[in-house]
Image (cartoon, helix red, strand yellow):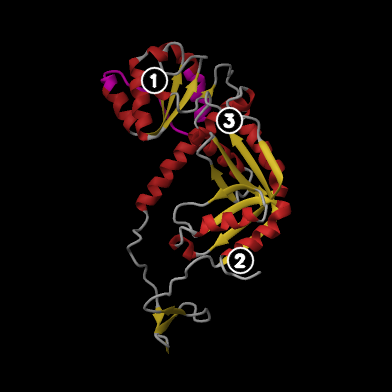
Amino acid sequence: MSDIFISYTNADRPGATILVGGLEQQGWSVWWDRAILPGKAWDKVIEEALDNSRCVVVLWSQHSIRSDWVRTEAEEAKGRGILVPVLLDRVNIPLAFRGIHAANLAEWGGQLQSPAFAELVRAVSEVLSYDTSSALRAAAPSNDVTPDIAVAPGAEQGHGRELADSFAPEKPATKIVPAIAAFDGAATVTSTANVALVWLEVSVEGPSLVQVMARALDAIAHVNVEVLALSTTNHSQGFSFLVPDEELGRTVTALESELALELAHGYVKPIMMDKNVGLLAVVGEGLSGRPDLPGRILTAISHEGVNISAIARGPGEPAIAIAVSRGGLERAARAARQECALGPG
């Protein structure tokens, strides 16, 4: 099995040769049709190599956009979610593949330290990491399997039984009870003022919102910045997120580097920031059983005259993150606590 399969046309062999050398210097195994031995049926060899590769790099050029073989290989890779397109020339990629961002090597001279090649390396690394993660999940024990543990009998405590870990008897015992009483509503409301809001919006001519979001979050992760909350909107091609305010500079620098090409061509609109915000978090398992509560909390905050910048809540998650103006954070927290019947806090 090879890490990378290169799809290209013979007319682009010089560029493919340089690219293969660069990818191999990253420690990856690369298959391309130079590996076909005499006497082998080349179409069967190519099909087998394609099936056994973890990532497919398709080289789009003025020649390959007219190649049925390259299109077929690209379609196979796209269907498996392992396609990484590369532009060798400034051409229009076939329509079926334009939704996937392509690394632009049209003016690349083979320098391994160039931003264009670095972008390609990140894209390939991401595909290969997904493949590895899937393999690890497949090899992991099923969640239905209970691991072997040593438990010492404990004393009866009311309607439950306490079980102690015999390997760590000094640790608190686990209490086994018939059922846990459900909690209706929020358990707590917390707030912090030390945050900053970052907003990115994609133009209609640019890459998809999902692609930009994935690349932006990956770039932020590479500089070890924690994303506190993430929010998208239905009415525009944009998303926003909160980071610690002391990390705002590193966050913007990482985004500008990762999305330099898109920002330069207007595919991604200029990055917007707001340090005049605070983060309000409403937490509690009971939120999933109270679909009315989030709306009531937001209404209560708006009645206090506090501006709401962003709202984040995943399906089924026992928390709501709300970005509000920093000057109104205390009033917003008080309103949320009162609406949740938690007292003044």
Q: Earlier in the sequence, mark 2 or mark 1?
A: 1
The residue carrying mark 3 is 118
Badge number at residue 34: 1
Q: Earlier in the sequence, mark 3 or mark 1?
A: 1
Q: The disc labelled 3 sits on which kind of residue? A: Ala
Distance from the alpha carbon under mark 2 to that under mark 3: 51 Å
Q: Which residue: 34% across, 34% down?
A: 52
Q: Residue 59 in magenta?
A: no
Q: Which quadrant: the C terminus?
A: bottom right
Mark 3 crowdedness (10 Å alpha carbons): few <14, some 14-19, many ≥20: some
Disc 3 to disc 1: CB gap under 8 Å: no
Look at the numbered disc 2 and give the secondary structure of its residue.
Answer: helix
Q: Which residue: 43% across, 46% down?
A: 133
Q: As drawn, which residue projects farthest toward the front?
A: 303
Instruction: Say if 24 sits above or below 233 in the image.
Output: above
Q: Quadrant of residue 316?
A: bottom left
Mark 1 crowdedness (10 Å alpha carbons): few <14, some 14-19, many ≥20: few
The residue carrying mark 2 is 338
First to last magenta residue range: 16-43
Look at the numbered disc 1 and give the secondary structure of its residue.
Answer: helix
Q: Nearer the viewer, mark 2 or mark 1?
A: 2
Q: The disc labelled 1 sits on which kind of residue? A: Arg
Nearest the camera: 293 or 273? 293
Badge number at residue 107: none
Estimate the x, y position of residue 337 in percent, counting from the top left.
61, 65
